[in-house]
Image (cartoon, rainbow, N blue to C red):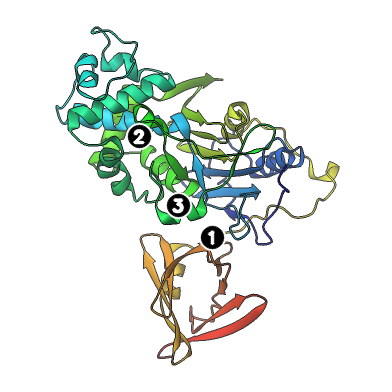
Amino acid sequence: MPTRRISSLPVLAGLLLASTTSAQVQPDSESISASVSALLDSEAVVGVAINIVTREGIWGAYGGDAGHDTRHLGSQSVFEIGALGGLFTGVLLADMIEKGEVSLEDSVLPALLKGPKLATGLDEKTTFMDLAKQPTEHEVSLLGLALAEIAGEPYEALIRKRILKALGMNSTGIVMTEEMQDWLTKGHDQQHKVVQPRKVKPSEAALGMKSTARDLRRFLEANMGAPRNDLQQVMRDCQDMELVWEKHSEDGIQVLYQQGKTKGYWAFLGFIPEKEIGLILLSNTGKELNDFAMKALLGKLPKIESEEVEEPEEIFEEVVLPDLPLMKLFVGRYLFDPSTSLVVSLKGDELFVQVDGKREFLMEAFSVQQFVLENNWILEFPVYEGGRVDRVVVESRGMKRVFLREGK
């Protein structure tokens, strides 16, 4: 069994859930942190990533073993997501309905007969509606294949063009990029034995997706609230038609969700449309965690009374992330000497740094002024009176260097 390893850096980045959230449904960060720690301590799972998304912001926790010597488990860590990837197929179906390419009442068999020969178990009366309503894994696969045949494109290329690219989900796919391979967590069975990545048959393309907490967060955010563009409207249509989404009702609260399990991974994504509260849970252990995820989303995990709990070694730490105006202060070119530079840029709501005009790294915040790079460098930006930022302190391998902003 692999040794459980906790990153020496703070592994929880986010904010306390806003007090404006309904008291009836309020995921509790302290209870979730304590429950995740208990999962790890009991060795129920090897590693876990959990994100909560609300109108007010994002809260996340990452703990356990990613299976890497050089990669801490974080928002860029890659997991197999199994049938959860069927949500992309549902959105694709809604998009093709909107464009008049297919109808829910159409028979699915003619499209499947055009593709590779396989045992479908379907007859000519089976419609797209039949496959899309609370589908099995086999039905999700067939649905993806049929839509790809109708569109005349490979399934993954179609999903990427119509959904993933528009949402900036660059670390999601069936065939992994070099960066995704670098961040792929090692999957484990329920006895914590390492398992090999799933080999996806052509007939199972829709079940072969891998993704990250960061990418799934973007998908979740695009599904919540009022639609802001055509794709988000299609996503609302997908919800309204109940395509692939599962429903769970409890105490008058309705949850839309989907989960996926492979031999070495488990994934959950769900949200409460009325409250605009969502949750993502990814694990590199093939253990069912649906009950845990649903209780976390509905705020029903056991409450932890701080005075009754012995203070453990810090595993999770809560921090407030920088907002957009503050991040803009960090943008610029910084010099250590004439030949050694850092260039900080802002793309959307994420900061990146380019080192010596070469490779560019995502800057993952773990406090308002501190960031970590995937090469384990830590960048700290002192902010002086009046919002002045004239330097960045870079820590690497226990050594600190000061880079001064050019022109200051």
Kindly identify the residue that appears in the image at 58 percent across and 67 percent down: 376
Q: Quadrant of residue 295?
A: top right
The amino acid type of the residue labelled 1 equals: Leu
Q: Which residue is mark 2?
A: 88
Q: Earlier in the sequence, mark 3 or mark 1?
A: 3
Depth order, front residue of 118/157: 118
Depth order, front residue of 264/331: 264
Callout 3: SS: helix
Compared to 173, does 351 lie above or below? below
Image location (x, y in percent) of residue 57: 49, 50
Image location (x, y in percent) of residue 126: 27, 10
Q: Earlier in the sequence, mark 2 or mark 1?
A: 2
Callout 1: SS: loop
Q: Quadrant of the N terminus?
A: top right
Cβ–Cβ below 8 Å for labels 3 and 1? Answer: no
- Apparent side of residue 120 relative to residue 30 in the rendered image (left or right): left
Kindly identify the residue that appears in the image at 25 percent across and 41 percent down: 162
Q: Quadrant of residue 189?
A: top right
Cβ–Cβ below 8 Å for labels 3 and 2? Answer: no
Depth order, front residue of 60/388: 60
Res 361 visible: yes
The amino acid type of the residue labelled 3 equals: Met
Q: Which residue is mark 1?
A: 321
Q: Quadrant of the C terminus?
A: bottom left
Compared to 196, does 371 lie above or below? below
Closest to the camera, between mark 3 and mark 2, is 3
On residue 180, the disc is 3
Q: How many marks?
A: 3
The amino acid type of the residue labelled 2 equals: Phe
Image location (x, y in percent) of residue 369: 55, 70
